[in-house]
Structure formats: C-alpha cells, structure tokens
Amino acid sequence: MYDTPLTALVLSGGGARAAYQVGVLRALAGLRRKASGPRSQASNPFGIICGTSAGAINASVLAAQADRFDATVEVLTKVWQNCSAEQVYRADSLGVIRTGAQWLTMLSVGWVIARWRRAKPRSLLDNTPLAEMLERMVPLARLPSMFEQRHLHALAVTASSYTSGEHHTFYDAAVPIAPWQRSQRVAVQQRLTQAHLLASSAIPFVFPATALDVAGVQGWFGDGSMRQTAPLSPAVHLGAQRLVIIGAGRMQEPPGRVVASSDYPNLAQIAGHAMASIFLDALAVDIERMKRINRTLALLPEAALADSQLRPLETLVISPSERLDDIAAKHLTALPAPVRALLRGVGVGGQGKQARGTALASYLLFEAPFTRELLALGEADTLARKDEVLQFFGWKWVPGAERAERAERDELAQLAVSAKPPDLVLP
C-alpha cells in the first residue's frame, strides 16, 4: 500500500544525469528503514509517480514493481552502477558511422547530395540497445495488478509530438481520471508501453523519434522535456497532495559570474546550452511558480481559500549540490573511442578544467565512473538534509534503529534478487 497523504514523485529528464535520482531514492529508502524500524520494505511511499525522459524510465521501473519499492531501488542502483554506453546506444565504430558520421556530414555538406539523401540517418546515435533493454528491464505488464492491489495510484510519462507540436502526458491510473488540456499541452489516459518510454527519452537530434498512437492517429514523438512548460502539472492533476521533486541539475548557481572562455562558442557549447534549457530550466521555473502560489494562498482567509480551486502543496525538492558538467569533465575519457571521436567533431574535448562541451557530454555519459559518482552525490545530498526529509514524510527517528552495514547490505541484495524481472540480466 502506498503512503498517505497521496505523495507524488516527480523525476525530471537529463539522460545519464538521471543516475543522480537513484542515489536520492536509495538514501530516502535507507532513511525510512532506519527511522521507522521494522516496517514493511514492500510499502511504496509514492502513490503517484511521474517521469520525463530518462526520469520516465526510472519512474516506470519503480511503478511496475511498486509492491517491492526498496528492492526495486536496489535493482536500479545496480543497473546505474554498472551501466555502459553500449547498453543505451550503438557505440561501436560501425554504429557511429551509420548514424552520427552521416548525420554530421549532411549538416556540413547538405541534403542535396543524392547518396546521403538515400541514407537519411535520423539521429546522431542509434538507441536500439535501449529499446532492447527496456523490454527486459521494465515489466509494465505488472501495472494493472499494482493498481488493483493499491500499491500505486497513477503513473505518468511525458513526450513531445513532432507531428502536432503538442506536449503529451500519457498516464494510467487505478481509477478513471478525466484528461486535462492546456495551451499546447494535452493528457491521454492509455495503457503505457515501452514505446512510450523510448519516445519520452528520445533526446532531440541525438536519438530518433518514436511512433505512438493517440486516439487512433499515429504521430512521431521525442523527448518529453521539450515544450514541457509545467513539469509539476501532471502530478497535481492526478491528485497529488504533496510532491517530492528530484532534479538533474543545480536549481540555483552560487553568486558570482563565471566565464570559462571568451572564445566564440562551438557547436557542443551551443548544444549544451540548449539541452539545459530543455531539461533544467522549465522545472526550476515551475517550482518557483508553485512557491509563489503557495505564498499567495497563505495570505487568503479560510473562506476565500475554500472557494478557490487552488490548494497549497507541500514539496521536497532535491537537486545536485555540484555542477554535473564539472563532474562529467573528469570522465570524458570513459566514453567509447568512436563516440569520443564523434563528439570531437562538434567541439567536445579536453579534460578537467580544459574540457569543452561537457554539458552536452554529460547527457550521453552512460559510463560507470560518471554514473557512480552521481549516485554517490544523490545519496550525500539527501543525507545532508536528513532532518528535513524526516519532517516532510513524518518519519520518526528511532534511537538505535541503525543496523550493521554489512547485514543491511546483504538483506538488500536478497531483496534486489527477488525484485529483479525474470529476463533482466544485471550488467
């Protein structure tokens, strides 16, 4: 059974940056076990789970196994601890040549050359390995039973339609929920599939669009972070009474103006700036908007508040305390050689303080050295706010409830084995 009041988990997009989310979730699960004593580890603290892009994949894994939350978090942790780019996109020389090399050539030479027109590569990288992994890793067929047994109230993933230009929220729920529609935003209740996850995580230009059926009409969809002007809206429409929001980038930069270079920006720098606008800015703006509404509602008398359709929302926002671009700069050499060569063509290179284009690279760095550091950062950032987390959830810290580290690790390992989908072979 999920916890009450109805709490929504909102996971943003960000490619490989989504490893940070799992670090946060692992810390939350650990705090709950230690604070609550011998409580059922199958209990799901999030009745509503909403995800975008790579966050949609994390969200769907959690939702499909909502009856064993702690164990599923451990499965996700192991996947991110041991991931590699080859599990997400073709990183071999032939795969890169067939997609990225031809795509960049057409950008520079033009579409008028007949032999390139026949090839028509659709993206910088081929994400066929991700499609195959989603089939093994995300048992969405379990969702109906999760709803029926009240382990989950609703799951929502987002995608952006290249065909209609609208932003879509695809959701499934334990009960019928009336779809909503706003300017350039529509909601569709339907059975969710791995195709929805592939569409939601199709980073523009980097991964190809995915075909989805909406009301009997097929359209082409890409990353859900595009045109996502209100990332918190799905959770609110689905009935959330409070929100846990995990970002994939710093919400605020420290004071002071930092200029890394005065040189003219290369293509990678411009692309990284665009990615930040797509993946990070909308969430920060929506959180600020929500806080302003909360402050305004706090000023209203009770009678006026009762007449209003708006209601204050309690929120817990956790985002990286460090710049993930800077962390990525330390791990560029972990990328497969063909991918490094491809990215050098758009301006990614160097290492450490001399690295260039690290913002773009950080979304594609599905390599264990990078993702493990993000996992550790997510755990550390959450534990640093232990008191705030406990207060938000209403968990009581039980003196002496900490278990021996080795015993707890062994227990979680057994839980992870029991939660693992039958066809999932951990890396």
Image: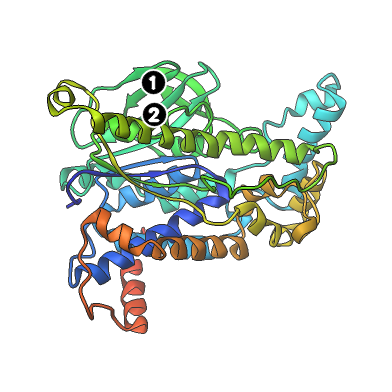
Relative height, residue 185 to residue 241 (above, below): above
Residue neighbourhood size for the residue with mark 2, other residues' Cα within 10 Å, grouped as few (<14), some (14–19), many (≥20): many
Instruction: State the image quarter where residue 278 is shown.
Output: top right
Q: Position of residue 378 (x, y in %)?
A: 47, 60
Q: Quadrant of residue 101?
A: top right
Q: Which mark is residue 186?
A: 1
Whether residue 149 is visible: yes
**Which residue is at a point 55% across and 21% down the rendered structure image?**
162
Front residue (pair 271, 389):
389
Residue at 65% from the left image edge and 34% from the top image edge:
274
Q: Which residue is mark 2?
A: 169
Please indicate whether residue 1 sits to the left or right of residue 102 in the image: left
> Quick check: marks 2 and 1 in contact, CB under 8 Å?
yes
Q: Position of residue 361 (x, y in %)?
A: 68, 49
Residue 67, label in figure: none
Viewed as shown, does residue 314 lie left or right of 118?
left
> In this orientation, does residue 427 appear?
no
Please tell me which residue is depicted at 51% across the width and 48% down the height of the picture.
248
* Amino acid residing under circle 1: Val
Scheme of image coloration: rainbow
For label 1, the SS is: strand
